[in-house]
Amino acid sequence: MSSDPGPGQFQFTPMAGAACLRLSGDWTLAHHGALAQQLQTLQPPLAADCQIDCSELGALDTAGASLLLQLLGSERLLQLSQDASALPAERRALLGAVARAMQATQAQAAPAPAGSAIGDLLEQAGRAMQGFWRHGVGLSGFIGLTLETGLRLLPRPRRWRLTAFAAQLESTGLHALPIVALLTFLVGAVVAFLGATVLQTFGASLYTVHLVAFAFLRELGVLLAAILVAGRTASAFAAQIGSMRADEEIDALRVMGLDPVELLVLPRVLALLVALPILGLVAMASGVAGGMLVCALQLDISPAMFFSVIEQQIGLRHFIVGLSKAPVFAFLIAVIGCLEGFKVAGSAQSVGEHTTSAVVQSIFVVIVVDAVAALFFMEMGW
């Protein structure tokens, strides 16, 4: 079978034991329509043992390569592109690129093989573990980068961002004082009310003071403040840096020779390192005040007796243990919030996703670290 005469032609000629496909003329966009019509008349598929002769092939472009792909198939076209004796190097590179692109498209379009429910579950678990591992490695690297930048700038006071530090301290500390004080006051009142309800049955109402003081000085004060800061400040850090990344402001800083970690991360980390211990003190005081109010109204325990019990029977070490966790919480919250901001891909949806991720991760890390610290201090007898 032969095609109508024209600039681009293909012709089957018999040979000993097999047929030979002879390609000639120009296979270009100008002759695409005529060649496409000729290819439609070719009904039987190309035999596997059919040889291809390209010695008379003229000009070739991507339109012609796509027609050859339709005629030969991706595998035969890829074999032809690897035959150094058939075509010049530039034409073989073009045919190879077209064949590989078609194979990649077919591989993506191919339906995934059906798997069992257990296999799918194990696959999802494996993907989750890989994601968790990659995130842990990335967080560790970002913590190291932050510490390295801070230590490098420590002996250079002229490069300290005091204005940015003051602005972040006001935003993360001063503006958070009302909500932290109000919430911990109410939680302190609830803890005292529950303790009084249970202990009054056994005639041990006075131990409500121990319950409130021990809980807030050692655990709840700093923990509640850290959770509030994680929801309020980590999301703000991620949204601020993420918006800058979406607007390509981070790239502009790098072009100007400025370090984004030095300019954006360190002031936020240092501000939260100062703000969270102060917020922890406020949370402790507010929680104890809420418990004292309930004791005075329900148990007839005067404020003087309340503070006398705390002074005589609640050790100072509980206050020190509780407050010692605040800098660790502050550093982790700030680093996670900034890291999620740097992960933003450049769209508003990505900003929202990473802001939510910053809040969830910060709260999760705070609770896990607090639980580990509580077990450690208990084992050490502190």
Image (cartoon, grey):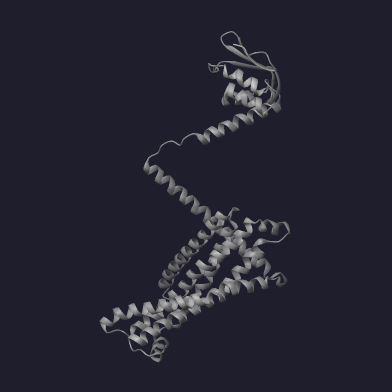
Rendered location of residue 49, percent (x, y): 55, 16
Q: Is residue 123 visible?
A: yes
Which quarter of the figure is the N terminus placed in? top right
**Residue at 46 percent of width and 63 percent of height:** 364
User: Left or right of 120: which side holds 64?
Assistant: right
Rendered location of residue 289, percent (x, y): 43, 83
**Residue at 66 percent of width and 61 percent of height:** 260
Rendered location of residue 103, percent (x, y): 56, 31
Rendered location of residue 243, percent (x, y): 61, 59
For the residue pair 100 and 153, the one nearer the viewer reads as: 100
For the residue pair 30 and 372, the one nearer the viewer reads as: 30
User: Left or right of 194: which side holds 315?
Assistant: right
* Above or below, comparing residue 273 to residue 205 in the picture: above
* Above or below, comparing residue 280 to residue 7 in the picture: below
Specify the quadrant of the image occupied by residue 167.
bottom right
User: Left or right of 212: which side holds 176?
Assistant: right
Number of numbered discs visible in the structure rendering: 0
User: Left or right of 136: which side holds 35?
Assistant: right
Q: Is residue 143 visible?
A: no
* Above or below, comparing residue 316 to residue 108 in the picture: below
Specify the quadrant of the image occupied by residue 250.
bottom right
Which quarter of the figure is the C terminus placed in? bottom left
